[in-house]
Image (spheres, rainbow, N blue to C red):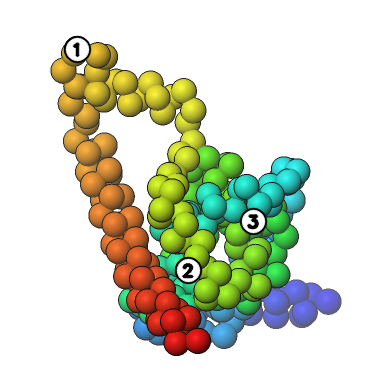
């Protein structure tokens, strides 16, 4: 028995030393162009799946969150923030998606692997060590609407998606950020009361706002261009019929 314990301790020490050597010698390649080692991939996938299930277990799914009236809000969020990486029916992924590792999944194929609560948790909190950002600054209503739309992706055609996005563009659907009255108070502080000069926002707030605006514009520009190209093709096909 003592021999077995001693052998396990020695093996553990050697494994620890090997891990330290890998870390400090830089042997492990962190480049996004280098795939994970099989054991690394297994560990990270297992941790990701178990973590999502554990943290989303207590989420209460709102009744009728997938009502037809909520879908336009989900379409708007998806088209502006998700399609550039995940793609959409008839719309290819943007250039940024091809440089991400692990690559963003095709949601039309993977959405059935998750429960409603798990999808909401992912959209709201993001996932570390991937390109999936957190959208916690958007309202829960918008995120649930996004989940509702994502669940419909497997059954949405290119023509249906094009029509949904074009309808949203025509109606000017807007984002719904979280914060409620706090957001309104912040807007009043930034712009000042009526008749008063606006307050100068802090430098970091201006920088964050600019970076966020640039990111969203690039994603939206890519999505809109691809979408309009697709809509034009669809229109041509319909005119020839």
Q: Secondary structure at mark 1?
A: loop
User: On the image, which quarter does residue 207 sit in?
Assistant: top left
Where does the N terminus fall, quadrant-wise?
bottom right
Q: Secondary structure at mark 3?
A: helix
Q: Residue at x 70, y 80 (%)?
A: 7
Which numbered disc covers residue 195? Answer: 1
Mark 3 Cα shell of 10 Å, populated few (<14), some (14-19), many (≥20) = many
Q: CA distance from mark 3 to mark 2?
A: 17 Å
Q: Is residue 31 left or right of residue 108?
A: left
Q: Residue 190 location in percent, x, y?
A: 26, 25
Q: CA distance from mark 2 to mark 1?
A: 44 Å
Discs 2/1, front? 2
User: Is the residue 176 above or below the residue 39 in the image?
Assistant: above
Answer with mark 3 or mark 2, whichever residue precedes in sequence: 3
Q: Residue 151 location in percent, x, y?
A: 66, 63
Residue with the mark numbered 2: 162
Discs 3/2, front? 2
Taking the image as drawn, is residue 139 in sight?
Answer: yes
């Amino acid at each position: 028995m003592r021999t077995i314990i001693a052998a396990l301790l020695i093996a553990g020490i050697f494994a620890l030393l090997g891990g330290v050597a890998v870390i400090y010698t830089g042997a492990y390649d962190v480049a996004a162009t280098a795939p994970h080692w099989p054991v690394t991939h297994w560990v990270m996938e297992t941790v990701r799946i178990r973590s999502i299930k554990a943290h989303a277990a207590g989420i209460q799914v709102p009744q009728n969150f997938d009502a037809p009236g909520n879908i336009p809000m989900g379409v708007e969020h998806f088209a502006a923030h998700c399609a550039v990486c995940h793609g959409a029916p008839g719309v290819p992924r943007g250039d940024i998606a091809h440089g991400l590792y692990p690559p963003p999944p095709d949601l039309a194929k993977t959405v059935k692997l998750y429960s409603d609560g798990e999808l909401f948790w992912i959209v709201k909190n993001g996932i570390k060590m991937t390109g999936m950002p957190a959208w916690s600054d958007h309202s829960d209503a918008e995120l649930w609407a996004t989940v509702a739309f994502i669940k419909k992706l497997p059954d949405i055609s290119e023509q249906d998606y094009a029509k949904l996005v074009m309808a949203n563009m025509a109606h000017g659907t807007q984002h719904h950020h979280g914060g409620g009255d706090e957001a309104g108070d912040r807007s009043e502080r930034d712009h000042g009361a009526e008749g008063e000069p606006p307050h100068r926002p802090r430098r970091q707030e201006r920088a964050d706002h600019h970076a966020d605006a640039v990111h969203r514009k690039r994603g939206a520009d890519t999505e809109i261009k691809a979408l309009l190209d697709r809509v034009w093709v669809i229109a041509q096909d319909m005119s020839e019929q």
